[in-house]
């Protein structure tokens, strides 16, 4: 039987086409049809989701505003040595005058000012002021005229900033996102410790996310265990209670926590009434990290319970019985036999909860106060309030990278195949 | 591991109810001798598995006491009973290798590592899987998993091993092979085995004694051959082996032979086993292979019948006949040379001895 496969002639269809070719053709058609079926959604996602995100991420390095607004100045600055400690020569000032005249007419100089203001405070007003008066400048001796308008034109620092950010791509946003900056000696260094904010926020986001994940495991494991061991009817009813929060708006749930946790709220009132807490020292449960952890643990708990439940459901109770029949106590049987089999569920739940919480925005915003906010709140601030989209994009890229690295690490250590969602 | 050992078990008036309304096990009294292979046989829902679970300690008895080696064990938790158990679906721990599975009960008993390895090795040899220690259960075939499960239940040398339909998931051939293997292991180790099954062949092949369960009650407790030859009631006669049943009324009783008039008027003689007396209803039980298609003159019962259907089965012919108004009457005819040719539609006389026909309690 085995050698017929080797010696048999090429199989053909009735019209002489080799069967292999014919099958390949048929499956190609099938694949094409499958692809056509998903095309509308694919296009929709590409156009409305992937492309804008890619554009947004590009903003984290994009920096053509200087070279576009001050094209001649950028060229003229190339010969200037920024380490010399002196201001550029007259040519550069002349080029700046020409550029600014055009920019002032097109009113683009203020945008440039606010962009450079991120890097060096004071630049915004410098450009605004200069833009107003550059039209009335006389020919020649531009250096003096500029310094007349503002002394800052006479300091090398101003020119260093302009030259530094004259290339069309910049690492400036990323440096700012990790609290670093370029030092005048062309090196890199961290900002003054009282100006650092993002590294600490990243650290806090990670720490709180881990705390929330651990809390979810501690609270979710017993519930999932109970659910998977109850008779069908009861467990279905309880499962509905677990899923109930999903049917309630996130805002409503978070607001409910505000009502419960505030100093004049239900929990504090009860504690005072019972006498556990004095009226004048009510617990600070909201607008800090405690509030964020409590509210987010509650909101993300179902994401832990569901994968745990679905994994536990498949573990036959005979394993525990078998372990006990061999002499293992309840605890030993649980720890050696039951628990290891639930690890995939813990893994799946932890990944879900951790990744969801690391990028969470609305709940920390509402109950986190200042000490309980996440990096995502800072990103939102830069997107909608300070309009520093480049920095927001850089923070987003870092957050995305952190999540991907953690995912990769998890895959290396636990193995993503060991994750079971159901 | 060889040598005589084994624990005795005694159920004393044990009852079990799950809901507090109906009894799943009713007043069970059962003595299991040390070293015995006892099978609990019965249809599903007959209470046999519940009895096993009570013995293992996973279900508490609602009433009565279970003794292990004459010590009451109702209040001993399962993990302190020292009872080995083989489960229906083997319950091998999927996250451990075969060797780790076998070492589990030894680790629980905090044996030294060397001792563990030695015992695991010997247990694997016993079930003829010496090189499989590093595999995962999922990488084994059903039969191999079964052997590992047996080895695991025996590796810590319990005096009593419980088996809950352990061969149910295997195909027929493997099941027969495993029956012999388990029987041999039992013989060489001398442990007491309590075995639960609904498969009568399994029960008859392996056991020293069989307890037939129905409706929470032991219907009969005896050696396999007695169970087949001398059923005590209609349920056992029906459940064990093939059986023709005929309903009628007792008309006379002489010693242990009684005359029975069937519902269609046929009069037969049968051995009295379980009839209340003259005038009472009875069900006769007759094994198909005890019927002769060429009756001897001295046979107690000779009745006419018509052949409805014949099935050729090699070593014997299975003939369905219409006898005494019953067209589900089965006769097994041995395939001998020179046997009279039978054909469908033929009217013949068949006969059997009164001692092969048991008059039992009435059913149906």
Image (tube, coloured by chain):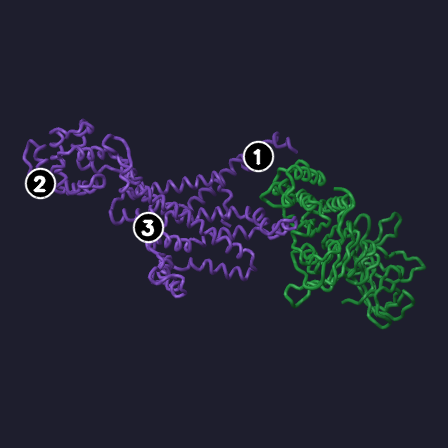
What colour do you see for chain B? green
Report the residue that reaches farthest toward the bottom: B279
The image quarter in which residue B243 lies: bottom right
Say whether residue A328 is left or right of residue A219.
right
Question: Where is mark 2, residue-wise?
Answer: A133
The subunit letter for the residue under badge 3 reads A
Secondary structure of the residue carrying numbered label 2: helix
The subunit letter for the residue under badge 2 reads A
Question: Where is mark 3, residue-wise?
Answer: A371
Query: Is residue B239 visible from the viewing direction of this image?
Result: no
Query: Is residue A385 visible from the viewing direction of this image?
Result: yes
Question: Where is mark 1, residue-wise?
Answer: A11
Disc number at residue A84?
none
Give a yes or no on whether discs 2 and 1 share a subunit: yes
In the image, residue B146 lies at what x, y percent? 68, 45
Give how far apart the Cα atoms at labels 2 and 1 are.
Answer: 87 Å
What colour do you see for chain A? purple
- Around disc 3, counting alpha carbons within 10 Å, would you say few (fewer than 14), some (14 to 19), or many (20 or more)? some
């Amino acid at each position: 039987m085995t050698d017929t496969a080797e010696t048999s002639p090429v199989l053909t269809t009735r019209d002489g086409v080799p069967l292999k070719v014919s099958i390949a053709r048929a499956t190609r058609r099938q694949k094409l049809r499958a692809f056509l079926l998903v095309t509308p959604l694919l296009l929709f996602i590409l156009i409305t989701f992937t492309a804008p995100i890619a554009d947004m991420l590009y903003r984290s390095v994009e920096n053509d505003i200087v070279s576009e607004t001050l094209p001649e100045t950028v060229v003229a600055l190339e010969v200037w040595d920024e380490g010399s400690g002196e201001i550029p020569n007259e040519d550069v000032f002349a080029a700046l005058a020409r550029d600014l005249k055009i920019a002032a007419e097109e009113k683009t100089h203020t945008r440039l000012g606010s962009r450079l203001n991120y890097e060096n405070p004071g630049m915004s007003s410098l450009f605004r002021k200069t833009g107003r008066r550059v039209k009335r400048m006389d020919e020649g001796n531009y250096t003096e005229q500029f310094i007349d308008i503002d002394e800052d034109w006479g300091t090398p620092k101003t020119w260093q900033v302009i030259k530094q950010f004259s290339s069309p791509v910049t690492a400036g946003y990323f440096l700012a996102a990790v609290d670093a900056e370029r030092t005048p000696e062309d090196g890199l260094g961290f900002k003054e410790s009282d100006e650092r904010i993002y590294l600490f926020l990243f650290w806090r986001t990670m720490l709180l996310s881990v705390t929330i994940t651990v809390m979810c495991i501690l609270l979710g494991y017993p519930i999932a265990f109970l659910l998977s061991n109850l008779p069908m009817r009861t467990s279905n009813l309880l499962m509905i209670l677990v899923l109930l929060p999903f049917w309630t708006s996130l805002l409503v749930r978070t607001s409910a926590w505000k009502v419960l946790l505030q100093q004049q709220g239900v929990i504090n009132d009860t504690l005072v009434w019972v006498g556990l807490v004095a009226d004048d020292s009510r617990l600070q449960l909201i607008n800090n990290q405690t509030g964020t952890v409590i509210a987010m643990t509650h909101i993300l708990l179902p994401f832990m319970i569901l994968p745990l439940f679905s994994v536990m459901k498949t573990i036959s109770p005979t394993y525990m019985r078998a372990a006990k029949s061999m002499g293992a106590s309840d605890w030993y049987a649980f720890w050696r036999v039951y628990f290891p089999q639930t690890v995939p569920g813990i893994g799946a739940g932890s990944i879900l909860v951790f990744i969801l919480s690391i990028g969470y925005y609305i709940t920390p915003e509402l109950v986190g106060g200042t000490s309980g906010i996440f990096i995502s709140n800072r990103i939102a601030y830069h997107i909608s309030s300070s309009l520093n989209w480049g920095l927001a994009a850089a923070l987003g890229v870092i957050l995305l990278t952190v999540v991907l690295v953690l995912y990769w690490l998890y895959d290396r250590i636990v193995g993503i195949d060991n994750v079971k969602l159901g | 591991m060889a040598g005589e050992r084994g624990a005795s078990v005694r159920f004393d008036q044990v009852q079990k109810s799950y809901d507090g309304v109906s009894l799943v096990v009713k007043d069970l009294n059962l003595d299991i001798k040390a070293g015995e292979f006892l099978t609990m046989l019965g249809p599903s829902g007959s209470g046999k598995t519940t009895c096993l679970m009570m013995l293992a300690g996973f279900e508490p008895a609602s009433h009565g006491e279970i003794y292990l080696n004459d010590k009451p064990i109702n209040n001993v938790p399962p993990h302190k009973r020292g009872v080995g158990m083989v489960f229906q679906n083997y319950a091998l721990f999927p996250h451990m290798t075969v060797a780790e599975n076998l070492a589990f009960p030894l680790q629980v008993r905090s044996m030294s590592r060397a001792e563990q390895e030695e015992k695991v090795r010997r247990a694997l040899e016993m079930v003829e899987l010496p090189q499989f220690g590093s595999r995962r259960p999922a990488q084994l075939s059903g039969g191999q998993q079964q052997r590992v499960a047996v080895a695991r239940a025996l590796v810590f040398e319990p005096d009593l091993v419980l088996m809950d339909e352990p061969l149910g998931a295997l195909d027929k051939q493997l099941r027969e092979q495993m029956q012999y293997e388990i029987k041999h292991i039992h013989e060489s180790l001398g442990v007491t085995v309590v075995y639960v099954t609904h498969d009568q062949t399994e029960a008859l092949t392996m056991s020293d004694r069989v307890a037939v369960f129905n409706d929470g009650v032991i219907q009969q407790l005896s050696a396999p051959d007695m169970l087949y030859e001398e059923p005590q009631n209609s349920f056992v006669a029906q459940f064990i082996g093939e059986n023709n049943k005929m309903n009628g009324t007792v008309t006379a009783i002489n010693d242990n032979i009684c005359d029975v008039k069937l519902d269609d008027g046929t009069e037969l003689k049968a051995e009295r086993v379980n009839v209340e007396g003259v005038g009472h209803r009875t069900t006769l039980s007759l094994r198909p292979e005890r019927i002769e298609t060429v009756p001897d003159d001295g046979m107690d019962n000779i009745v006419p019948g018509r052949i409805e259907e014949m099935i050729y089965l090699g070593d014997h012919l299975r003939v369905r006949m219409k006898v005494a108004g019953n067209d589900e009457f089965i006769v097994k005819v041995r395939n001998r040379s020179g046997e009279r040719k039978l054909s469908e539609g033929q009217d013949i006389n068949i006969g059997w001895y009164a001692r092969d026909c048991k008059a039992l309690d009435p059913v149906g």
